[in-house]
């Protein structure tokens, strides 16, 4: 049998394993059940004191414990758990012997406050400068902090645990990171460098400083009460995104390799696209051209036309700017279809999982294809009259879905889109 | 698996057509080459004593980052990188060329930005003096952090700033993970151009070594060079690296794309390979370097090695064992001359390899141990080695066109 190629003559890339974790729970079954039931994972933060904060809720993953706690350790543990789930489903390779590279989307790593305070205590005086911290940092007492807070530490741990091949790549394209990890895997398979790739995205960074940083940029919702109603994509009274934690893992394979080993094919990554916006550090170009270009590149990469897309899994952060921009740019690409294609934002329920979002939402898109059911956008009680999407509001909708576009847009002008389909075109 | 060991049928040759350097030796190719030729090293043994750093030679940021507003939005590491990226675009002759810049693919190797150390120490001091209300940290962070500081710290905002300042509108990916991130950035950019996915890419990184928060991070592992400066190969008894400030960017381009616009190559980037040695036993890393060495295309020309060896142990001793198997290749250490610029060290190594090939000479040794020897004649093949101080190994082959 000849290798199935796409319209551009490249190997078709399929998904044979998926693992997911969000504030809704662990695993595909639990997440999907709660997602289509319209449940929210957003709750008042209990991990640390919320006094003095403008935003006091988030989609934290509190059911996974790590000791000692750090956001990086939580990110690592979540990534490990979702990878286990994905590998179990894919049944590929042997234990600790994954036959391909790792592409990991992970939040930038840094020394965190619990550790910094530990250093402060070790100084043992009341006036503390960085020179004092430097004086007590060496000698091996804190050597685990070095290993923990290397940017490559999470990827190195996963690569060793799962036996991925070659140099694991840790990447950040801000809120598009998850989509970029998938894109890197797709490209490696299309180039014929590997038959399989492990694409993982994880984010466990709900900590005081991260929350404050987004808060100072006025990016977060402050509708704290009730927390479940804070994330309001496409609503008139939306006021920002809700920070959240989560992770997603996908096993990608060439169609040829997957079928040769009799693997069940869960879906196809039909197209990927990305385009940089050089307008501003946090805002999109007012003409939307980079996002329009990103969507068009993705359609071209998939060899598809807008009328072949029958569902859009929106970036839908619920910031005032994003959702409006997403409708305007989608309209520019899809014309009147932009008002007919059902659109949903998973972020209404799981919040914005930042570095993980692109992968989390790609997995939700693949589950949508599998179940032929579109999860709702909850808190959609007061539609923004200028956003004329056919939003799947509040209740899940059964629909014939053959191809989904999933969008991710991030700080630093990062735009990435994916097209996912049920079967090879 | 995702290595690019050699040109396969249907793959295109990839040229290095632009180099941008801003380092502790100076800015631009001539200044860096002159300093290398004169064996000059710029170290500061006092400013961060007992720690040693290689400070950036002051540059006029205005010439590459004309808007003061843009400069204010960045921390030093981003300014250095945005500046060096502009030099690379100038060097390739594509600065301001909207057609090319609108499609150029960027792969950046980055760490994170500097913390506001006054905010950190202020909070720690107040807590040591008894501030223990539950919301104390929140309130101080809300009131003390500059709102835009986050953007100066985010890893992918180096690429973001380069795109904004120089008007790049293609694609943008940021790789993290210390030293090997620089090798992976070059590896992926090369693979994409060689396979026809991309025509032209800007690849590189930047690092500000004059940072106490970074010194703390590496001091956890006792990795900082202390006391007195010594060349990398002469640090066995007091190992460590001296952080370096540097920005190094390359323009990589398919031969056809370069020829079509009449661009001349410094050299060609023939291969980039990388791996993650387990480093559980002595010799593990050297074995991985041998494996990578074997994956590179055949070396038949006049060869040399430019390594980013850090001076940290046991990595440097392991690497020295590897180098002992290849004594027919004269070695140069960028760590001795430029300090250790982490994610930037590997792109810096590629840049110096391409520069040496284009200038028809390897720069002179700068070493008291005999590890680096003189080289007569023009190198035609230079292997760039980058073994991380902790994890990750990369290697590249740069060749004369």
Image (cartoon, coloured by chain):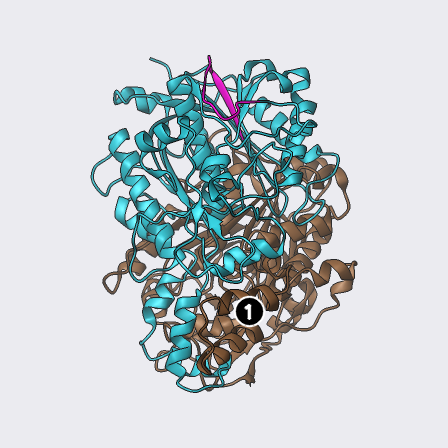
Chain colours: A cyan, B brown
Query: Whole-percent x and y of residue A338?
Result: 63, 20
Q: How many other residues sit within 10 Å of disc 1, few (<14), some (14-19) or many (≥20)? A: some
Q: Is residue A96 above or below residue A269?
A: below
Q: In which quadrant of the rendered image does the N terminus of chain A lie?
A: top left
- Dot 1 falls on which chain? B
Q: Residue at x 61, y 50 (%)?
A: B159
Q: Which residue is mark 1?
A: B140
Along the viewing direction, whichever of A214 and A263 lies nearer the viewer: A214
Q: Is residue B19 above or below residue A327?
A: below
Along the viewing direction, whichever of B169 and B292 lies nearer the viewer: B169
Indicate whether residue A99 is drawn in magenta. Answer: no
SS state under label 1? helix
Q: Residue at x 43, y 57 (%)?
A: A151
Left or right? Give the position of A98 relative to A418: left
Indicate whether residue A392 is drawn in magenta. Answer: yes
Disc tally is 1
Left or right? Give the position of A257 relative to A211: left
Q: Residue at x 32, y 67 (%)?
A: A144
Q: Which residues are magenta?
A: A391-406
Query: Whole-percent x and y of residue B312?
Result: 38, 72
Query: Whole-percent x and y of residue A314?
Result: 55, 30
Query: Whole-percent x and y of residue B257?
Result: 66, 36
Along the viewing direction, whichever of B225 and B395 lies nearer the viewer: B225
Is residue B202 visible from the viewing direction of this image?
yes
Along the viewing direction, whichever of B351 and B204 lies nearer the viewer: B204
């Amino acid at each position: 049998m000849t290798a199935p190629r796409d319209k551009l003559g490249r190997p078709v890339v399929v998904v044979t394993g998926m693992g997911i974790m969000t504030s809704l729970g662990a695993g595909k079954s639990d997440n999907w059940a709660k997602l289509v039931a319209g449940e929210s994972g957003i709750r008042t933060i209990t991990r640390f004191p919320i006094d003095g904060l403008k935003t006091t809720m988030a989609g934290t993953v509190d059911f996974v414990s790590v000791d000692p706690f750090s956001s990086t350790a939580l990110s690592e543990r979540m990534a490990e758990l979702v990878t286990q789930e994905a590998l179990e489903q894919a049944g590929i390779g042997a234990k600790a012997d994954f036959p391909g590279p790792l592409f990991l989307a992970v939040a930038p790593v840094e020394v965190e406050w619990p550790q910094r305070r530990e250093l402060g205590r070790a100084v043992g005086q009341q006036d503390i400068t960085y020179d004092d911290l430097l004086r007590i940092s060496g000698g091996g007492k804190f050597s685990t902090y070095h290993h923990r807070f290397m940017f490559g530490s999470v990827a190195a741990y996963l690569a060793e645990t799962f036996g991925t091949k070659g140099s694991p790549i840790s990447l950040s394209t801000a809120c598009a990171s998850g989509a970029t990890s998938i894109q890197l895997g797709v490209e490696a398979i299309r180039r014929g460098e590997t038959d399989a790739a492990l694409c993982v995205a994880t984010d466990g960074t709900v900590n005081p400083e991260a929350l404050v940083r987004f808060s100072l940029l006025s990016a977060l919702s402050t509708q704290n009460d009730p927390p479940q109603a804070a994330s309001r994509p496409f609503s008139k009274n939306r006021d920002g995104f809700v920070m959240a934690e989560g992770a997603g893992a996908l096993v990608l394979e060439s169609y040829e390799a997957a079928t040769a080993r009799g693997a069940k094919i869960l879906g196809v990554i039909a197209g990927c696209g990305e385009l940089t916006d050089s307008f501003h550090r946090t805002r999109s170009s007012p003409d939307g051209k980079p996002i329009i270009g990103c969507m068009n590149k993705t359609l071209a990469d998939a060899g598809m036309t807008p009328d072949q897309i029958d569902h859009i899994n929106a970036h839908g952060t619920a910031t005032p700017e994003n959702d409006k921009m997403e409708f305007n740019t989608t309209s520019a690409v899809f014309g009147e279809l932009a008002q007919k294609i059902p659109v949903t934002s998973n972020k209404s329920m799981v919040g914005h999982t930042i570095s993980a979002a692109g992968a989390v939402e790609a997995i939700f898109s693949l589950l949508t294809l599998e179940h032929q059911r579109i999860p709702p956008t909850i808190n959609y009680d007061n539609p923004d009259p200028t956003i004329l999407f056919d939003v799947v509001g509040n209740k899940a909708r059964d629909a014939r879905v053959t191809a989904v576009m999933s969008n991710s847009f991030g700080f630093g002008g990062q735009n990435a889109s994916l097209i996912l389909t049920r079967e090879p075109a | 698996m995702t290595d690019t060991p050699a040109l396969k049928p249907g793959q295109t040759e990839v040229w290095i057509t632009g180099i941008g350097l801003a380092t502790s030796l100076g800015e631009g190719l001539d200044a860096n080459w002159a300093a290398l030729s004169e064996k000059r090293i710029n170290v500061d043994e006092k400013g961060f004593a007992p720690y040693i750093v290689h400070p950036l030679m002051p540059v006029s940021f205005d010439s590459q980052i004309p808007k003061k507003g843009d400069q204010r939005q960045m921390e030093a590491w981003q300014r250095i990188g945005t500046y060096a990226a502009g030099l690379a675009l100038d060097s390739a002759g594509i600065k301001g060329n909207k057609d090319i810049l609108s499609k150029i693919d960027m792969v950046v190797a980055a760490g994170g930005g500097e913390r506001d150390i006054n905010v950190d120490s202020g909070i720690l001091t107040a807590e040591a003096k008894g501030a223990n209300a539950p919301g104390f940290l929140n309130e101080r962070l809300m009131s003390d952090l500059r709102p835009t500081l986050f953007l100066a710290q985010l890893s992918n905002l180096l690429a973001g700033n380069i795109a904004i300042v120089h008007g790049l509108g293609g694609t943008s990916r940021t790789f993290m993970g210390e030293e090997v991130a620089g090798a992976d950035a070059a590896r992926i950019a090369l693979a994409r151009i060689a396979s026809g996915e991309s025509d032209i890419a800007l690849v590189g990184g930047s690092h500000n070594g004059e940072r106490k928060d970074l010194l703390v991070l590496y001091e956890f592992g006792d990795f900082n060079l202390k006391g007195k400066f010594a060349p990398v190969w002469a640090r066995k008894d007091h190992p460590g690296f001296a952080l370096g400030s540097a920005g190094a960017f390359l323009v990589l381009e398919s031969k056809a794309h370069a020829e079509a616009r009449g661009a001349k190559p410094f050299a060609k980037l023939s291969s980039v390979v990388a791996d993650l040695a387990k480093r559980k036993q002595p010799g593990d890393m050297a074995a991985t370097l041998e494996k990578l060495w074997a994956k590179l295309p055949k070396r038949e020309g006049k060869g040399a090695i430019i390594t980013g060896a850090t001076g940290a142990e046991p990595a440097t001793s392991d690497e020295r064992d590897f180098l002992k198997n290849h004594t027919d290749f004269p070695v140069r250490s960028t760590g001795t001359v430029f300090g250790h610029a982490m994610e930037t060290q590997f792109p810096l190594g590629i840049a110096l390899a391409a520069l040496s090939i284009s200038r028809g000479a390897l720069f002179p040794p700068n070493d008291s141990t005999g590890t680096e020897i003189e080289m007569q004649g023009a190198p035609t093949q230079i292997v760039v080695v980058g073994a991380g101080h902790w994890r990750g190994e990369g290697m590249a082959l740069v060749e004369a066109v």
